[in-house]
């Protein structure tokens, strides 16, 4: 358990290494760009890189909060699956739109997407107000869709790719939670039971 917090710690450690070794090309060797076809590790390593301290703080806070929430709902291993799978999907899509990108945002949006499906009425603070997580998700999606058409350093398409793939994982794991613990009912033909009683219960 506590994989969300461990991932947050790893990301902080990687950022410290970035600060120390960036002049030697550490970040450039691991961020996501067109070289990923010949250097496929970039699809994963880019998730752990961040552009600056504010980028890091926002993502670490979101990962620690929403990651811990999702982990509590579906367990650590399934949380890791959601985090890495949605992060990879977001990167595979966004690499077609951005010259280079880095950060855990796609994976974090994936985690949020899963929470929206599993527990849509969970209240969180977003935009300075308490609201159900599904409402916050709608606002975040709207903001990113608007942001696609506005020049900025934010990889909005990665966010959208992450949250929509997270919604799919949410459907899978919500169904799994519903079915978990259900006892399988065994049905027997009534005529067979009565025949057995007549033959063996006299």
Image: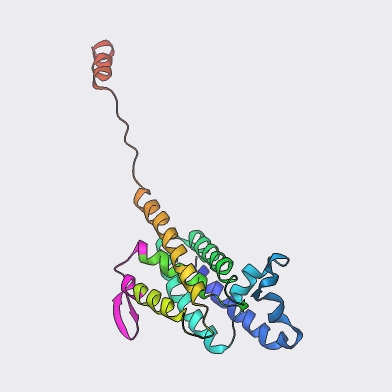
Q: Give the residues drawn in magenta, as a range.
A: 117-136
Q: Nearer the viewer, residue 108 or 11?
A: 108
At a point 62% along the width and 74% down the height, the residue shown is: 46
Chosen colour scheme? rainbow
Occupied quadrant, residue 51: bottom right
At a point 47% along the width and 84% down the height, the residue shown is: 150
At a point 30% along the width and 29% down the height, the residue shown is: 187
Residue 48 image position (x, y, % from top left): 60, 75
Residue 19 image position (x, y, % from top left): 67, 88
Q: Nearer the viewer, residue 200 or 20?
A: 20
Residue 10 image position (x, y, % from top left): 60, 75
Residue lying furthest front: 149
Residue lying furthest right: 24
Q: Nearer the viewer, residue 165 or 169?
A: 165
How many numbered dots are placed on residues in this image? 0
Vertical side of 120 occupied by 145: above or below: below
> Could you tell me which quadrant the C terminus lies in?
top left
At a point 52% along the width and 60% down the height, the residue shown is: 81
125 left or right of 169 in image: left
Q: Is residue 101 magenta?
A: no
197 left or right of 68 in image: left
Residue 117 image position (x, y, % from top left): 36, 62
Q: Nearer the viewer, residue 190 or 117?
A: 117
């Amino acid at each position: 358990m506590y994989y969300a917090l461990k991932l947050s710690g790893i990301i902080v450690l990687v950022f410290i290494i970035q600060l120390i070794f960036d002049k030697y090309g550490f970040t450039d060797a691991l961020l996501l760009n067109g070289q990923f076809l010949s250097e496929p590790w970039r699809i994963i390593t880019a998730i752990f890189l961040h552009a600056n301290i504010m980028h890091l703080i926002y993502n670490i806070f979101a990962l620690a909060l929403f990651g811990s929430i999702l982990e509590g709902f579906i367990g650590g291993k399934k949380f890791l699956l959601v985090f890495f799978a949605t992060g990879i999907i977001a990167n595979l899509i966004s690499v077609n739109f951005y010259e280079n990108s880095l950060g855990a945002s796609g994976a974090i949006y994936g985690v949020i997407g899963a929470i929206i499906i599993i527990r849509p009425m969970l209240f969180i603070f977003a935009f300075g107000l308490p609201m159900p997580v599904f409402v916050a998700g709608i606002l975040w999606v709207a903001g990113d869709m608007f942001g696609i058409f506005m020049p900025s350093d934010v990889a909005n398409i990665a966010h959208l790719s992450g949250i929509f793939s997270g919604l799919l994982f949410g459907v899978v794991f919500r169904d799994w939670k519903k079915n978990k613990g259900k006892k399988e009912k065994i049905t027997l033909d009534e005529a067979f039971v009565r025949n057995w009683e007549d033959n063996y219960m006299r």
